[in-house]
Every structure is written in structure tokens, then in C-alpha cells.
Amino acid sequence: MEHAEIVIGRGRQSDHVLIQVRGRMHPGSTDYWDGNWLISPIHVQVGGFTARIDAGLRVEELRDFRVALERIHADVRGSASLSSMENWIELTVECHPTGSLSISGAVADHPGKRNILHFAIESLDQTDIPPLVDALVAVEERFPILGHR
């Protein structure tokens, strides 16, 4: 199965965060707690910095991010956050009344360690939200939430 990609930014030629969803971390699990972990390495390219993190995100973290992005796109205000349970990534997309976006975040190379890259991505606007939402929907379709809390 080909992996899914989520690009936060305007593509790989400019500042961006790339999340590659490669599959379920525990493919045989059907319960909520183990079944919803995704193998999802994160690549960050901002300014002169690059980071590659072998992260694990959860399906519901990506879903919650998508729902919040849809809300700020409709309201043209507010913020949407992607916050991973194990602190791999903290990312906030803030939509201003003018339609411009501010993106700030941090990635850690290992949960509990002190190596953290803080970053900001600029020059984006509300038109950058729909492709991001589409990518998140594609991940949800390929990897639906399993089990019940």
C-alpha cells in the first residue's frame, strides 16, 4: 500500500512540514488504544533547517486537526492545532480575519528528550487550507478510527 502524505505549507520547494503516513503501527490490532497508532515520519524544512523524525501519530489526532481546520476555513478566524500524545509535534495554524495564516510549531526527535526544533511558516493564506484538509481526509479514509474508547 502506498503511503499518504500531508503537506503543511505550499509544497516541498518552500518551507513546509511533511507527514508521511505509512501504515498502522500495530496492523493486527483492532482495539482503540493499539489499533490507531500510525507509522508517520515527519519531515520539516524551514529556512536553513531540516528535521526528520521517526514519529508515531494517532488517527484521532489527525482527525481532530482536520475538523479544526475545516472550522477556521469556514469562519475565517480561529486556530487549529495538531498535538501528538507523545510530543512528536506541536503545530498551530492560526487564521486571521484577513484570511492570512500563521503557522508555528515544534518537533522533537524523541519523546522526553530535549532536542526540539521550533519553527514558523509564513506567507500562507486561507486558500492553503483545502488541500491540507483533502490530504487529512484521504488519511482518514485509508486508516479509519478503530474500536471504541
Image: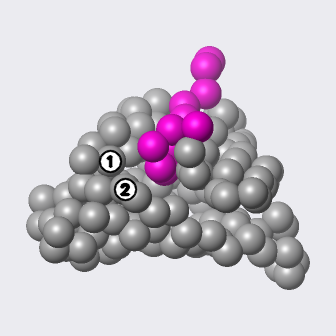
Query: Does any portion of residue 19 appear in the rendered image?
Result: yes
Q: Range of the magenta residues?
A: 1-13
Distance (Cα) linking label 1 and label 2? 6 Å
* Front: mark 1 or 2: 2
Under mark 2, the amino acid is Leu
- Badges 1 and 2: C-beta atoms under 8 Å apart? yes
Please give the name of the residue rendered at 86% of the width and 81% of the height, measured from the top-left corner. Answer: 114
Identify the secondary structure beneath mark 2.
Answer: strand
Quarter of the image that includes the N terminus: top right
Please give the name of the residue rendered at 30% of the width and 50% of the height, measured from the top-left corner. Answer: 129
Classify 10 as above or below 47.
above
Is residue 63 shown left or right of residue 14? left
The image shows residue 110 at horizontal and vertical percentages of 84, 67
Q: For residue 124, which numbered disc appears in the image?
A: 2
For residue 75, what is the image quadrant?
Answer: bottom left
Please give the name of the residue rendered at 61% of the width and 20% of the height, measured from the top-left corner. Answer: 2
